[in-house]
Amino acid sequence: MAGLNKKSVDDINVKGKRVLVRCDFNVPLKGGVITDETRIVAALPTIKKLINDGGKVILCSHLGKVKNGPNEGESLAPVAARLSEKLGKEVKFVADYNVTGADATAAVAAMNEGDVVLLQNTRFRGEEETKPGKAGEKFAEELAELCDDYVCDAFGSAHRAHASVAVVTKYVRAKGGSCVVGYLMEKEIKFLGQAVEDPVRPFVAILGGAKVADKLNVISNLLEKCDTLIIGGGMAYTFAKAQGNEIGTSLCDDTKLDYCKEMIEKAQSLGKKLLLPVDAVITDHFPDPIDDPSITTEVVDITAIPADKMGMDIGPKTKELYAEAVATAKTVVWNGPMGVFENPVLAEGTKAVAKALAETEATTIIGGGDSAAAVNQLGFADKMSHISTGGGASLEFLEGKELPGVAAADDRA
């Protein structure tokens, strides 16, 4: 895997140097309060290492989707406050919406060894995420002017060729600086890379979530790598229909029926197990609000979903089947819930899979996104070997794609 031979923070000496660290502080906020600080905690080991080594640590990150230009609701100010508490020292926040303007330059110029500065939300600069090839060259250059070396520790953004993720490295390198990965990136690459390239077998991959379209290449790639592939979530109904079953009003992508048939055949020809739901929890409508606990359900065989009902979760027989497959595994990768897990009544399938993973001796890797949220929510997080901080990035990694944020780091000689 290309990502495994990259220089890390352990390979550079940052004493007295200005180090720009691209973190992933894209945390959920409610009324200006951080509701889940997993990503802040995940960034601490790299930041502490650079502080202890006498670096001048400049942090940057995006937050939110920033649709209508800069706004206080997506400012990184709450992150700076939380980081200050966690590090036990002031993290100076530069509130400038321009990110790299005069305020940032002045704050960096005033830094002593071991100081920490956090720049404003990188997406407040429109050039951050313009199309690859045009990605904010000027913004990337200005970021590079603030530092001597660059550390990418934002796995959750590593699949995007953004100015602060990939383009900045060109300008740091041009002035003789190093571009390395942080501890979090290293850990992500190690766990995901090993699972895909050299797993301890039996290797079981579990894919859920709503859409087959999101997971096309992952399904195909993982079938070649794993011993058993388990399918759940909304996309299982497209597979069910491809097998000739009536699926009622369940979620289905009719344009992907042939693809599902191909994957079923591919599994057979490769001698791999492809496990699909044998029963389903059905309702007569999608819950509104999504967490409405009063929704009525029944369990039916996957071949017997009535025309006016929709599948919302895997049924008890499927839960057992999937748990058995996990119990004998040595490596398990899980991406995507088994049902509408946001609803307590429809979370049982996802819970059963999480519990099976928590109880196995196998190396268990949770591929970010909804699976990570589910594992955290259900209280199983401490039982997993590794929970990825990047949903989209871990999916692209499992697809076998090279991630721009990883590719841009210096190779080890």
Image (spheres, helix red, strand yellow):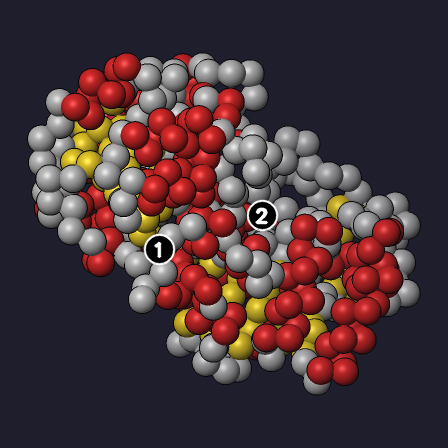
Point 49% across, 37% down: residue: 162
Q: Position of residue 33 (x, y in %)?
A: 35, 25
Front-lying residue, 389 or 15: 15
Mark carried by residue 341: 2
Local crowd size for mark 2, using a 10 Å CA cut-off: few (<14), some (14–19), many (≥20): many
Tell me the residue at 30%/59% (across/down): 7
Residue topped by disc 1 = 410
Per the image, label 2 sits on a secondary structure element best described as loop
The answer to whether 411 appears left or right of 195 in the picture is left
Residue 19 location (% of width, % of height): 23, 39
Q: Nearer the viewer, residue 138 or 213?
A: 138
Give x and y (percent) for residue 34: 36, 30
Apparent side of residue 96 relative to residue 363 in the rendered image (left or right): left
Asked if the residues shown at circle 1 and circle 2 are in contact, with their CB atoms under 8 angstroms apart, the answer is no
Q: Nearer the viewer, residue 43 or 387?
A: 43
Q: Residue at x 45, y 21 (%)?
A: 124
Residue type at tag 2:
Phe
Tag 1 secondary structure: loop
Q: Amino acid at mark 1?
A: Asp
In-front residue for pair 116/379 = 116
Residue at 11 percent across and 44 percent down: it is: 15
